[in-house]
Image: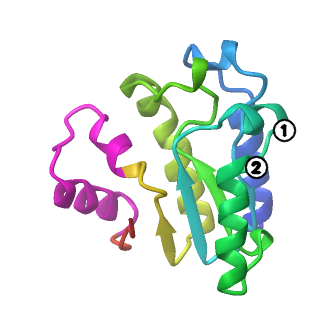
Amino acid sequence: MISKQNQLSKLNELMKNCSQCSLRSGCTQVVPGAGSADAKILFIGEAPGKKEDEIGMPFVGAAGKFLDEMLGIINLKREEIYIANVCKCRPPQNRDPLPEEIAICWPWLLAQIKTIQPQLRGSCAFVYKAANDLPGADPQPQSCHAGLSQALQHRRVYT
């Protein structure tokens, strides 16, 4: 049986070779995610920013520094969690990802969640918007949470 880390590494390589949307041609690199494949906690952001695009790691700018401080307060290190973004490539001028870009990247995020199987997912306030941008989405928060919960094997989504 292949380890979670190997599964995640293979998934990350597939993501790095993705060119299904226009975001790939305008970014420096794909930013799949970072952290432990055995993480109990998964943080999900919107999309890579300028620093993340340059370095290839999520949450390395000001938001990353703040996240590291918050993790320190609860005695966790970045290496103990997993951090991913809904969109894996930086949108131009740091704009919000478009619904079609989110729809293209959404299966990548679901595959990461399925591989890691975290006990807790924190959305960093974007997953609600992203889920509502998917085709056929119901804009009500409870519908979004219910839909994500169902998609993520009935685990609760914390936002």
Whole-Å distance between the Cαs marked 2 and 1? 8 Å
What's the magenta bit mostly, secondary-structure-wise? helix
Task: Assign the N terminus to one quadrant of the image.
Answer: bottom right
At 80% from the left and 39% from the top, the residue drawn is 56
Quickly name the residue at label 2.
Answer: 60
Q: Is residue 44 above or below residue 50?
A: below
Q: Residue at x 72, y 39 (%)?
A: 31
Q: Residue at x 75, y 63 (%)?
A: 35
SS for callout 2: loop
Q: Which residues are magenta?
A: 128-153
Q: Nearer the viewer, residue 68 or 112?
A: 68
Query: Which residue is most to the right?
Result: 55
Q: Is residue 24 left or right of residue 119?
A: right
Q: Is residue 109 above or below residue 136?
A: below
Q: Which residue is mark 1?
A: 55
The kind of secondary structure element at disc 1 is: helix
Residue contact at pointers 2 and 1, CB within 8 angstroms: yes
Q: Residue at x 74, y 75 (%)?
A: 80
Where does residue 28 sit, x and y in percent of width and height? 78, 22
**Can see residue 2?**
no
How far across and down, in percent of the image, does residue 15 sit?
68, 36
Image check: 51 left or right of 95? right
Residue 11 x/y as whole percent: 70, 46
Residue 43, picture quadrant: bottom right
Asked if residue 11 is among those painted magenta in the image, a careful observer would answer no
Examine the structure image and report whether residue 149 is included in the region drawn in magenta: yes
The amino acid type found where label 2 is placed reads Val
Query: Identity of the amino acid at label 1?
Result: Ile
